[in-house]
Image (cartoon, helix red, strand yellow):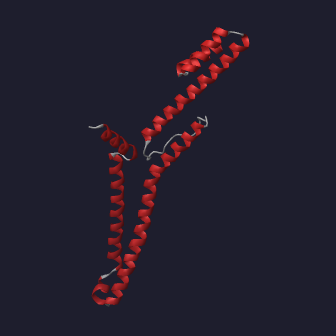
Amino acid sequence: MTDSGSRNNKRSRFLLDRPGQREVATRMLLVLTGIGALYAVAVWFLIGSDLIWGGSLGQMRLVLMGVHAAYFVIGGGILLVATLLVTHRYAGPALVMERAVDSMRRGEYDTRLSTRAGDFHKDLTLKLRHLRDELREREDARTTLLTELEACLEQGDIAGGRARAEELRKGPTASTAKAAQETAAV
């Protein structure tokens, strides 16, 4: 498989994977089947045999037009609600992730980053949650190293200050943060 084909496959899995497509298609098919069943029940009960055999053509036409109108209004309403529910399963997690990314850019790491039971993009939300935790740990490590650097400078400890500055240049990691916190506690 080519590199571009691999990217397209990843892109399509990100937006809607195969199980998600089947689930949405199945739900929509069930909704349409239910609307059709409602229509059949309405026709069965609203158009009695006395209207068909004994009524005029004008009466039958009016009843059929009423049944059709009710079918389209009720069916359209049901389809609208089903569409809103499905799109909220996609849009909800996207909105949560967007807000979380905006908060992380501001240095705030306590924004809600969870999805509901039937939502899509759970794996992406989980990865973003791990990223948030890593960024929080790095920020904590950087803050600890800066505090230690200030302390070294105030005490005139040039060697300790250089060591902390070198750690800052390399970029603190979670293990650096834990070690720095343990050192600061001692």
In the rendered view, tell whether residue 143 sits above or below residue 19.
above
Please state if 149 lies on the left or on the right of 33 as rendered: right
Tell which of 165 and 182 is nearer to you. 165
**In the rendered image of this protein, does residue 6 appear above or below residue 160?**
below
- At 29% from the left and 85% from the top, the residue drawn is 52
Q: Residue at x 43, y 71 (%)?
A: 73
Note whether 70 is above or below 77 in the view shown. Answer: below
Q: Quadrant of the C terminus?
A: top right
> In terms of depth relative to the viewer, which is nearer, 76 or 142?
142
Q: Residue 104: image x %, image y %?
A: 57, 36
Number of numbered callouts drawn: 0
The residue depicted at 56 percent of the width and 25 percent of the height is 138
In this orientation, does residue 112 appear? no
- In front: 52, or 178? 178
Would you say residue 23 is visible in this rendering?
Answer: yes
**Residue at x-position 35% and y-position 71%:** 39
In the picture, the quarter occupied by the N terminus is top left
Residue 141, x across and y down, in percent: 59, 22
* Residue 85 falls in image quadrant: bottom left
Q: What percent of the width, then of the height, locates residue 137?
A: 56, 26
